[in-house]
Image: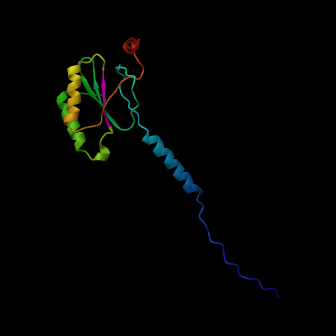
């Protein structure tokens, strides 16, 4: 009589293919959602040769030629802007914007522009970015000649 021996069963290993699929999908999701760009209403910006792209969450303050102030496309007053900045600074750090992005029309009054810059600094923000156009305008071309 032939005797058959018992073989130890092979240890079962889980199939990790679905796990890898989920990990790659999550990775793609986080990479795509982490790339934020400054966006908003189109405004003619002053040009600058040293302009750089800004990424991350930003609070946009727009100064129009007629003196109107828009914050994230909503028209507000200087008084409202001060309180909005204070309330934003009181939020947890994770809910605060990475940048305060100031967009100003080239024909806006300098006095109003300086008041907004001063207000942002007074409230405690140190991450003010002044938006410019990276394409040199006619004035820049004339200055280089």
Is 65 or 54 nearer to us in this picture?
A: 54
User: From the image, which quarter does the C terminus lie in?
Assistant: top left
Q: Is residue 3 left or right of residue 105?
A: right
Q: Is residue 118 above or below residue 136?
A: below
Q: Tell me which residue sits at (30%, 20%) in the image.
A: 105
Q: Position of residue 135 (x, y in %)?
A: 42, 20
Q: Is residue 19 above or below residue 38?
A: below
Q: Position of residue 45 (x, y in %)?
A: 35, 21
Is 93 or 122 nearer to us in this picture?
A: 122
Q: Is residue 129 above or below residue 87?
A: above
Q: Tell me which residue sits at (26%, 37%) in the image.
A: 126
Is 18 or 87 nearer to us in this picture?
A: 87
Is 121 or 18 nearer to us in this picture?
A: 121
Q: Let me know if residue 20 is in the magenta part.
A: no
Q: Is residue 99 left or right of residue 19?
A: left
Q: Tell me which residue sits at (81%, 85%) in the image.
A: 2
Q: Is residue 69 above or below residue 20?
A: above
Q: Main secondary structure of the magenta part?
A: strand
Q: Position of residue 70 (x, y in %)?
A: 27, 27
Pick out the residue farthest to the right.
1
Q: Let me know if residue 103 is in the magenta part.
A: yes
Q: Position of residue 58 (x, y in %)?
A: 33, 35
What colouring does the structure picture have?
Answer: rainbow
Q: In the rendered picture of this protein, how many numbered marks are placed on residues?
A: 0
Pick out the residue farthest to the bottom.
1
Pick out the residue farthest to the left.
79
User: From the image, which quarter does the N terminus lie in?
Assistant: bottom right
Q: Is residue 92 left or right of residue 83?
A: right
Q: Which residues are magenta?
A: 99-104
Q: Tell me which residue sits at (43%, 42%) in the image.
A: 34
Q: Quadrant of residue 14?
A: bottom right
């Amino acid at each position: 009589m032939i005797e058959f021996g018992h073989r130890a069963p092979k240890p079962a290993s889980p199939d990790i293919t679905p796990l890898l699929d989920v990990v790659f999908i999550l990775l793609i999701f986080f990479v795509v959602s982490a790339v934020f760009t400054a966006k908003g209403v189109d405004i003619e910006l002053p040009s600058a040769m040293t302009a750089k792209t800004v990424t991350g969450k930003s609070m946009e303050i727009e100064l129009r030629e007629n003196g109107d102030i828009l914050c994230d496309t909503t028209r507000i007053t200087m008084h409202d802007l001060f309180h909005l900045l204070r309330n934003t600074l009181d939020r947890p750090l994770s809910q605060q914007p990475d940048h305060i992005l100031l967009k100003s029309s080239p024909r806006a009054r300098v006095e109003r522009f300086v008041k907004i810059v001063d207000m942002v600094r007074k409230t405690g923000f140190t991450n003010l970015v002044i938006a410019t156009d990276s394409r040199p305008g006619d004035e820049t071309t004339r200055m280089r000649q």
